[in-house]
Amino acid sequence: QVQLVQSGAEVKKPGASVKVSCKASGYTFTSYGISWVRQAPGQGLEWMGWISAYNGNTNYAQKLQGRVTMTTDTSTSTAYMELRSLRSDDTAVYYCARAKLDDYESYYFDYWGQGTLVTVSS
Amino acid sequence: SYELTQPPSVSVSPGQTARITCSGDALPKQYAYWYQQKPGQAPVLVIYKDSERPSGIPERFSGSSSGTTVTLTISGVQAEDEADYYCQSADSSGTPVFGGGTKLTVL
């Protein structure tokens, strides 16, 4: 069965960086992309970006350009999301999700990780 | 930026039908997807490509589309269906966008 298992909770100071991992199993890792979606406390879902596990191509949300980097390690079927220059409003649960392309070349998300809470506080 | 609009809350009694709408100008040209999220849990895909149901999702969940509005319908609502529901689609460039979410309360 498809599983995405994420790394544990993190507490960071403003200005620091965080790197969250997402280990995939139960499917051919390089056949799908991975997206990252975050959810601030009590708020809705926000798409952060996408990475192809096949060739490493990325597509980031405009508001995060320059602060976020997504990578994959195909040898371990693991995706990573690094967010730099953290601010208090980056406090959120960060989810990885397997991304599928539909007929309009747009993404949707059929399996999700359990989420990783990142708290940014001085 | 592109927005998908959902009602903040919907309330129904057990056994009744719940309808949750999602409106967006690009919906006639993009598919819509629906996710269920229970407290403290990750979202779960319940409807894809406007009206398709993933395996394992109960038949009481259905989706439909009409113009700039898509609708998630839950027939014969059960207490376990109480959750937040998010629609998702894409803007004209294919960038994923989520609606603000609808809290479904089962009275």
Image: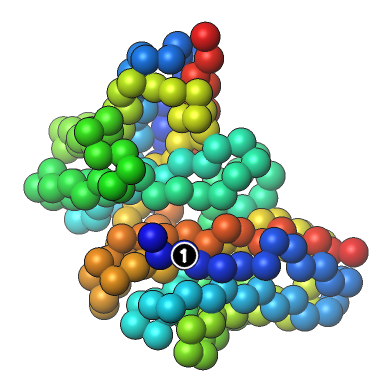
- Residue count near mark 1 (Cα–Cα under 10 Å), binned few <14, some 14–19, many ≥20: some
Task: Say which chain tag 1 marks.
Answer: B
How many numbered badges does the structure rendering display? 1
**Closer-to-camera residue (A110/B50):** B50
| B9 left or right of A105 in image | right
Report the coloring of the rendering. Answer: rainbow
- Left or right: A42, with B99 as reference point: right
As rendered, which of A121 and A117 lies closer to the eye? A121
Identity of the residue furthest to the bottom in this view: B66
Residue B3 visible from this viewpoint:
yes
Q: Is residue B18 above or below residue A64?
A: below
Residue at (30%, 48%) from the top-left corner? A61
Residue pictured at 50% horizontal, 67% vertical: B4
Residue beneath the point at 70% across and 78% down: B19
- Where in the figure is residue A114, as x and y percent of width and height? 50, 39
Q: As displayed, is residue B29 above or below residue B44?
A: below
Which residue appears at 46% of the width and 30% of the height?
A90
Q: Position of residue A23 (x, y in %)?
A: 33, 35
Q: Is residue A80 above or below residue B105?
A: above
Q: Position of residue A60 (x, y in %)?
A: 25, 46
Q: What kind of residue is marked 1?
A: Glu
Could you say where residue B31 lies in the image, as x and y percent from the top left? 39, 77
Element at badge 1? loop
* Quarter of the image where one finds residue A87: top left
State the residue lying farthest toward the left.
A55
Residue B72 visible in the picture: no
Task: Classify residue A104 by image quadrant.
Answer: bottom left
Residue ID for mark 1: B3
Q: Quadrant of residue B6?
A: bottom right
